[in-house]
Amino acid sequence: MKYAFPDNFWWGSASSALQTEGTREGETTWDYWFAREPNRFHNGVGPQHTSTFYQHWKTDIQLLKQLNHNSFRTSISWARLIPDGIGEVNPDAVDFYNQVIDELNEQGITPFITLFHFDMPMAMQEIGGWENRDVVDAYARYAQICFELFGDRVLHWFTFNEPIVPVEGGYLYDFHYPNVVDFRRAATVAYHTVLAHAKAVQAYRAGHYAGEIGIVLNLTPSYPRSWNPADVKAAHIADLMFNRSFLDPVLRGEYPADLVALLKSYDQLPACKPEDGFLIAEGKIDLLGINYYQPRRVKCRDSAVNPQAPFMPEWFFDNYEMPGRKMNPYRGWEIYAPGIYDILVNLRDHYGNPRCFISENGMGVENEQRFIENGQINDQYRIDFISEHLSWLHKGISEGCNCLGYHMWTFIDNWSWCNAYKNRYGFIQLDLETQQRTIKKSGEWFAATALNNSFDKE
Ligand code: BGP
């Protein structure tokens, strides 16, 4: 069967500043943490060893072109642009981002720019990070500076990438700095991130810039083990905590009442100011980026909660291992392509069918060298993964969902936070020793699909 996509469908990929650029003036939480606990990073490889985009941006953009990208998302590094977070703008950073943006536009590749992709300037973390409302204001100033500097040529802005991940990693589950385990502080961080998002949207609207502004959320559809009411309730609470805590404010301009009531009953609500509600209502977006990697399967808890243990989302559900699920064993994530369709249908039916696109989807695989044939990685598994997801996305579009594009994670194999270079996601293989780039078979497949605006699949 032929799967054809609407005209002007966005074909591209995503990356982020910290994971690709390398060499940087401003310190981030990642640099700080790596210097203290290198053992937390796979093979002790830290954020200075990335795919050298700062040096190779021009040839890398040529490669994007070869992959027939018509759009590409990356982020601006707040710490590079304003090394102490709040002070002077670094002119070298302005030059760098101007060159990248201009070159993308010249090559016919529309730049999609994220303002914050997990890379908190250390100077901002030192004053409390997202727990401090001064950091919210500093971020709003940074966002406004970006709009002024680049807003004439960047028409698609994203305030945050996966804002729940620093909440989970840094304040609940110990996989980002500052390695706190405290739900109330996590809720404060999440809440202040929403305020920061809303302030950036407000500034963007006030400046009457030419483009649109949105956010990128990692949506994990929450599937109950069964239709038993106890399982359904567990899935509902997981959905409130992990999806709707950001989805509702940015699309509806308010939090779900039952999430607020639940947290209130456990005394976990952050401190709110009366004017916050108006601000959040002004944070409604033009465009939603959806990162989809895996579903969340849950069931009602098997055991009673230990009241001495820290309050956690898992007080309300157990994770459920569905028999027969298909796994990506390298990342430990379930592969479930229909999830992409379920997300789009949920947005269509419950959120007014917003303009949206898949801003990340992908498959990280370890030791891909074993698949080299005639000098090229034959990653047929990645082609199968993409085409399967695209076929479900196609079904969503054919049923009226407002999905405008598909971006893969990622372009060139890059540095993946604590996993460093363990799993490779790229269309292009990176040789870590020589920094040589070689297009994988999936890159060729994607280039053809983008060129034809369609692909064939049985
Ligand atoms: C997303 C992030 C990316 C990227 C990707 C792959 O959550 O937006 O930055 O890293 O996941 O995940 P990982 O690198 O953890 O394997």
Image (tube, rainbow, N blue to C red):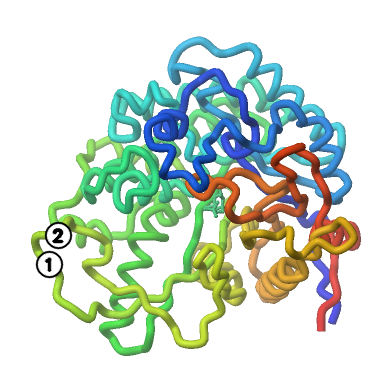
Asked whether residue 314 is in view, the answer is: yes
Q: Is residue 36 left or right of residue 351?
A: left
Position of residue 249 measured from the top left corner of the image (x, y, whole percent):
40, 51
Residue 3 versus residue 89 in the image, above or below: below
Asked if residue 152 is positioned above or below residue 284 in the image, the reply reads above
Indicate the quadrant containing the C terminus: top left, top right, bottom left or bottom right. Answer: bottom right
Q: Which residue is mark 2?
A: 309
Quarter of the image with the N terminus in it: bottom right
Query: Badge 1 local density, few (<14 within 10 Å), some, or many (20+)?
Result: few
Q: Residue visible at 47% across and 65% down? A: 220
Q: Nearer the viewer, residue 179 or 7?
A: 179
Q: In terms of secondary structure, where does tag 1 sit? A: loop
Say which residue appears at 82% left-offset and 79% top-offset: 457
Q: Position of residue 363 (x, y in %)?
A: 63, 62
Q: Give the residue furthest to the left.
A: 308
Amino acid type at image mark 2? Ala
Question: Which residue occupies the foreground of this view, 282 or 213?
Answer: 213
**Residue 99 spot, x, y in % from top left:** 76, 23
Residue in the image at 48% along x and 32% along y: 200
* Residue 7 visible in this rendered orientation of the protein: no
Whether residue 14 is situated above or below residue 368 in the rendered picture: above
Q: Which mark is residue 134?
A: none
Q: Is mark 1 within 8 Å of ligand 1?
A: no
What amino acid does circle 1 point to? Asn
Q: Which residue is mark 1?
A: 306
